[in-house]
Image (spheres, rainbow, N blue to C red):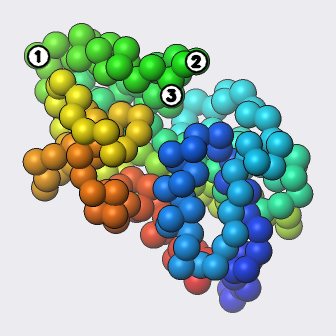
């Protein structure tokens, strides 16, 4: 079914209060001529994330943001999955860092729980786009790699300093942001999102 591209030249609210995430998403949106503002700038309070999957939480956030602003809203729910420790921290990735976003303690918790188990891990990103016409669509991306300790690099955010993507010998925290933005879980989800808009 042919459809009009719903966003070019329009205002889009990014349903996040995470400055690093908003900057990364804005960078990915540049080619679309979309003016994006953050939920914080739009005065949207953060909803309680009660979903049990990345997709459920992304949809919850995008629909909440749309309900408050009336504007097209794009939410991202993402996190680190470590199979050897039961898939943790998973959807609780941000919460493992606590209210003060102290990722050093989250790194240490992962290192302790991992012990000598396999350090394979992957990042998941699910984007959810909610439109004023009542439709919501979601798009998932993943990037696989291995964890390393101690953390290395300060170019990324969140768990980037302990994650080495497959095919590289540096962490996301050490990688040039342009390269990271082309191979990350968010980039893979965005590729699907852009295909949808076309």
Asked if 75 appears above or below 36 in the picture, the reply is above
Looking at the rendered structure, the secondary structure element under dot 2 is loop
Left or right, 15 with reference to 163: right
Crowding at mark 2 (Cα within 10 Å: few <14, some 14-19, many 20+): few
Mark 1 / mark 3, whichever is N-terminal: 3
Residue nearest the observer in this picture, 90 or 176? 176
Q: Earlier in the sequence, mark 2 or mark 1?
A: 2
Q: Quadrant of residue 197?
A: bottom right
Viewer-nearest of labels 1 and 3?
A: 3
| Residue 146 x %, y % | 18, 38
Q: Position of residue 78 (x, y in %)?
A: 49, 42
Q: Circle 1 sits in a helix, a strand or a loop, which is it?
A: loop
Give the mark toward the camera: 2 or 1.
Answer: 2
Q: Residue furthest front?
A: 154
Position in image of residue 138 (x %, y %) = 60, 57
* Residue pictured at 13% horizontal, 55% vertical: 167
Find the distance from the CA under tag 3 to the CA under tag 2. 9 Å
Per the image, the residue denoted by label 1 is 116
**Quick one: quadrant of the C terminus?**
bottom right
Q: Nearer the viewer, mark 3 or mark 2?
A: 2
Relative to 140, say whether 98 is above or below: above
Whole-Å distance between the Cαs marked 1 and 3?
A: 24 Å
| Crowd around label 1: few <14 · some 14–19 · many ≥20 (10 Å) | few
Residue of label 3: 94
Residue 193 appears left or right of 1: left
Q: At x 27% / y 57%, what residue is drawn?
A: 176
The residue to which callout 2 is attached is: 99
Q: Is residue 157 left or right of residue 63?
A: left
């Amino acid at each position: 079914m042919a459809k009009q591209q719903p966003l070019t030249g329009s205002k889009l609210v990014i349903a996040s209060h995470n400055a690093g995430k908003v900057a990364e998403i804005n960078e990915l949106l540049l080619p679309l001529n979309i003016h994006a503002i953050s939920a914080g700038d739009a005065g949207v309070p953060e909803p309680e994330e009660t979903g049990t999957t990345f997709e459920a939480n992304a949809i919850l956030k995008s629909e909440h943001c749309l309900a408050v602003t009336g504007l097209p809203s794009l939410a991202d729910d993402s996190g680190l999955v470590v199979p050897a420790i039961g898939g943790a921290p998973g959807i609780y990735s941000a919460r493992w860092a606590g209210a003060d976003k102290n990722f050093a303690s989250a790194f240490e918790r992962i290192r302790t729980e991992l012990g000598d188990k396999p350090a394979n891990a992957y990042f998941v990103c699910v984007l959810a786009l909610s439109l004023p016409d009542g439709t919501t669509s979601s798009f998932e991306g993943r990037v696989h790699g291995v964890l390393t300790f101690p953390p290395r690099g300060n170019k990324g955010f969140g768990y980037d300093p302990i994650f080495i993507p497959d095919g590289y010998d540096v962490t996301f925290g050490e990688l040039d942001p342009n390269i990271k933005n082309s191979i990350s879980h968010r980039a893979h989800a965005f590729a699907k999102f852009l295909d949808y808009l076309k």
